[in-house]
Image (tube, coloured by chain):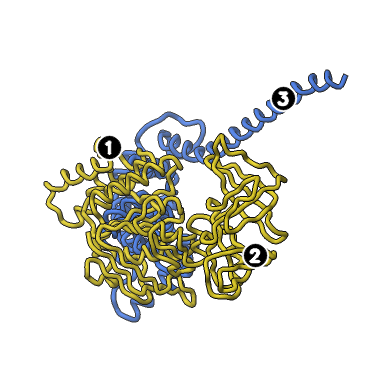
Chain colours: A blue, B yellow
């Protein structure tokens, strides 16, 4: 009697387990799909909107055209803003990475009092709200100009200096993470084979942390390029970055030009990511 | 190839001596093994020779030149790491070429030297591979080729075999030793594996707690261990605590009266090698003849360990060969054990009971 009961119960239990597992897998997929949709929906609508023909965005669209993309080219504010943003981002990224890599090396490799503090401090710009940071730098610039008489306020140098602060935390974070994965003994091996400290860094350590450095460059660049809050305080007359140009345009008009600019923005960043990913698997570093 | 002299080397971290006054002379072409348990200072000593540990005191000379204060890259020492430490982004050939490039060897001479070194370790066909495409044993040989290609004055091996599986390890031991002999290169190896040390070394240095306990050949260490630690670490020993009378008699704590080599009177411990103890069903007729009961039988394959209770306080291990003509007693059986007086090595002193029966699991 009991034997038959057990035999009968086991396929039922197995089927129940199977169903539960299928349900679990379905729930996981559904959650992933929802998250993906949540991220992509705004991008989808912005892209769609940028091709609307009419000036006031309303549904349904009254036809499609590329006129808003053409409108960008005739708008000097966008072109100048784009060029300035690129220039600032390139220079700030170069400086930030050049400063951040040695900083990361010091934090990861040297033992000195205040190491933890230095680490937190270098990551600070990532944590402090951009508006607070921007204001702080602005006040600093004002005070510096008063004290020294140098034209710091609203200067290009001042803007770049501010953006360097955006790049440094990315570099420190990503490069220290890469360094943690580097086997110290390969550096010792290089030294025992006759390489001095600098040669060891150039020939062994740098190639090992290159994915981290490349990722830091990319993220630093993207963060600088898209930064609004900090730049608001630091731009001078006649000097406007692309995000600020977009904001200013929005104060007067809401035609799909903004959508078109955003789409180009997204394409540029996506292009940079894809290009980088060809050389370094970003997902492995970040 | 050169002579290596370590002179009164000490490394101190605060109050803790990682290495204390270690002196060692390695002759040209000699293969010396530093042997000891983990934390005994053997690796610190090796790393001091390589230049990665700054000595607190003492000097290191290589080929007559004082290298104590030289950075690692100016020492001309070939180092093989436990994890091989190959450069993951460089091919096998580029790995091997690294030391030559650092020495500014002309480009044209590098390739033939690399090829020769790879041929020496039987990897001539794998020069284009990346390290991760090789097996552990192959990586180990690349590391060896990389350390040898620039003709270092001394070869330093830091537990080079511990990441290999047991069978491969036995082969590589012989391979490394033959290669070392063929090149006549002065070599220092670090290991905690006594079998490895005994197979490979010309001379062994047994270390414990940062200090050298004994230096000698395999036979010297085995036949005449300088202290309890060496007797327990090189080969195996059963220790019997007691006292010596100064005239070749030893009275154990368990009340056994035994004959031994004459030593100073006082508290002492007697070390017995399991393989020197005879075990039979009838009295053995040796200087020391005891009867006892088998309490544990450990089947090792080539030999069998018998743990025999000889007094309420003492149990000794006798090893018998595993042969068809030797009957293996079973647990609970009464047997006779015996050994010549000269095989009971007596170490004066008391309180070293913690190290008793070391090496006998």
Specify whether B236 is left or right of A274. Answer: right
Residue that carries the numbered disc 1 in the rendered image: B126
Residue that carries the numbered disc 3 in the rendered image: A14
Q: SS of the residue at dot 3?
A: helix
Both marks 2 and 3 on one chain? no
Residue that carries the numbered disc 2 in the rendered image: B257
Q: Quadrant of residue A183?
A: bottom left
C-alpha distance separating marks 1 and 2:
65 Å
C-alpha distance separating marks 1 and 3:
51 Å
Give neighbour class at mark 3: few <14, some 14-19, many 20+ (Cα, 10 Å).
few
Give the letter of the chain under mark 2: B
Q: Which numbered dot is residue B343?
A: none
Both marks 1 and 2 on one chain? yes
Inspect this view and state whether residue A148 appears: yes
Comparing B287 with A141, the one in front is B287
Labels 1, 3: front one: 1
Q: Position of residue B115 (x, y in %)?
A: 20, 42
Q: Position of residue A227 (x, y in %)?
A: 41, 55
Q: Residue at x 76, y 23 (%)?
A: A10
Give the letter of the chain under mark 3: A
Comparing A20 with B125, the one in front is B125
Q: Position of residue A7 (x, y in %)?
A: 79, 20
Q: Is residue A147 above or below residue A269?
A: below
Count of labels in the image: 3
């Amino acid at each position: 009697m009991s034997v038959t009961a057990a035999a009968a119960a086991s396929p039922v239990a197995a089927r129940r387990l199977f169903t539960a597992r299928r349900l679990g897998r379905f729930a996981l997929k559904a959650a992933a799909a929802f998250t993906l949709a949540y991220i992509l929906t705004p991008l989808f609508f912005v892209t769609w909107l940028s091709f609307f023909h009419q000036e006031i965005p309303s549904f349904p669209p009254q036809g499609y055209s590329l006129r808003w993309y053409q409108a960008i080219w005739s708008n000097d504010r966008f072109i100048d803003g784009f060029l300035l943003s690129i220039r600032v981002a390139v220079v700030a990224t170069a400086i930030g990475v050049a400063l951040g890599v040695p900083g990361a090396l010091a934090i990861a490799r040297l033992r000195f009092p205040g190491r933890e503090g230095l680490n937190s401090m270098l990551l600070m710009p990532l944590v402090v709200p951009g508006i607070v940071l921007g204001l702080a730098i602005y006040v600093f610039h004002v005070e510096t100009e008063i004290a020294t008489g140098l034209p710091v306020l609203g200067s290009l140098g001042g803007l770049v200096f501010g953006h360097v602060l955006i790049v440094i935390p990315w570099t420190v974070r990503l490069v220290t993470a890469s360094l943690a994965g580097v086997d110290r003994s390969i550096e010792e091996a290089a030294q025992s084979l006759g390489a001095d400290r600098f040669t060891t860094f150039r020939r062994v350590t740098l190639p090992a942390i290159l994915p981290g450095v490349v990722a830091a460059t990319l993220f630093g660049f993207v963060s600088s390029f898209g930064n609004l809050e900090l730049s608001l305080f630091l731009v001078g007359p006649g000097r406007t970055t692309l995000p600020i140009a977009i904001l200013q345009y929005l104060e007067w008009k809401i035609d799909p030009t903004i959508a078109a600019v955003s789409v180009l923005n997204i394409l540029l960043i996506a292009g940079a990511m894809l290009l980088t990913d060809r050389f370094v698997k970003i997902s492995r570093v970040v | 190839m050169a002579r290596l002299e370590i002179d009164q080397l000490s490394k101190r971290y605060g109050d803790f001596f990682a290495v204390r006054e270690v002196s060692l002379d390695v002759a040209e072409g000699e293969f010396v093994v530093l042997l000891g348990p983990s934390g005994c200072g053997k690796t610190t000593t090796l790393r001091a020779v390589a230049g990665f540990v700054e000595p607190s005191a003492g000097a290191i000379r290589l080929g007559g030149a004082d290298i104590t204060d030289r950075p690692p890259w100016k020492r001309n020492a070939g180092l093989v790491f436990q994890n091989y430490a190959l450069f993951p982004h460089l091919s096998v050939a580029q790995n091997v070429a690294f030391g030559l490039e650092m020495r500014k060897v002309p480009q044209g001479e590098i390739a033939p030297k690399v090829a020769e070194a790879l041929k020496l370790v039987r990897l001539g066909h794998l020069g284009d591979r990346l390290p991760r495409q090789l097996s552990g044993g192959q990586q180990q040989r690349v590391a060896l080729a990389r350390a040898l290609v620039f003709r270092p004055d001394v070869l330093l091996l830091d537990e080079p075999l511990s990441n290999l599986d047991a069978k491969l390890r036995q082969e590589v031991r012989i391979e490394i030793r033959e290669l070392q002999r063929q090149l006549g290169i002065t070599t220092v190896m670090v290991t905690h594996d006594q079998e490895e040390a005994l197979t490979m070394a010309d001379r062994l240095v047994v270390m414990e707690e940062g200090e050298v306990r004994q230096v000698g050949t395999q036979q010297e260490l085995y036949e005449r261990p300088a202290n309890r630690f060496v007797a327990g670490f090189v080969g195996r020993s059963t220790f019997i605590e007691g006292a010596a009378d100064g005239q070749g008699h030893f009275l154990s704590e368990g009340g056994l009266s035994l004959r031994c080599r004459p030593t100073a009177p006082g508290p002492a411990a007697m070390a017995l090698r399991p393989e020197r103890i005879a075990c039979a069903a009838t009295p053995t007729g040796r200087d020391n003849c005891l009867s006892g009961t088998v309490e544990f039988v450990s089947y090792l394959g080539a030999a069998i360990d018998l743990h025999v209770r000889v007094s309420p306080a003492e149990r000794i291990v006798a090893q018998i060969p595993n042969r068809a003509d030797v009957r293996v007693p079973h647990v609970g059986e009464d047997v006779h054990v015996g050994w010549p007086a000269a095989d009971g090595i007596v170490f004066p002193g008391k309180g070293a009971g913690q190290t008793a029966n070391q090496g006998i699991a």
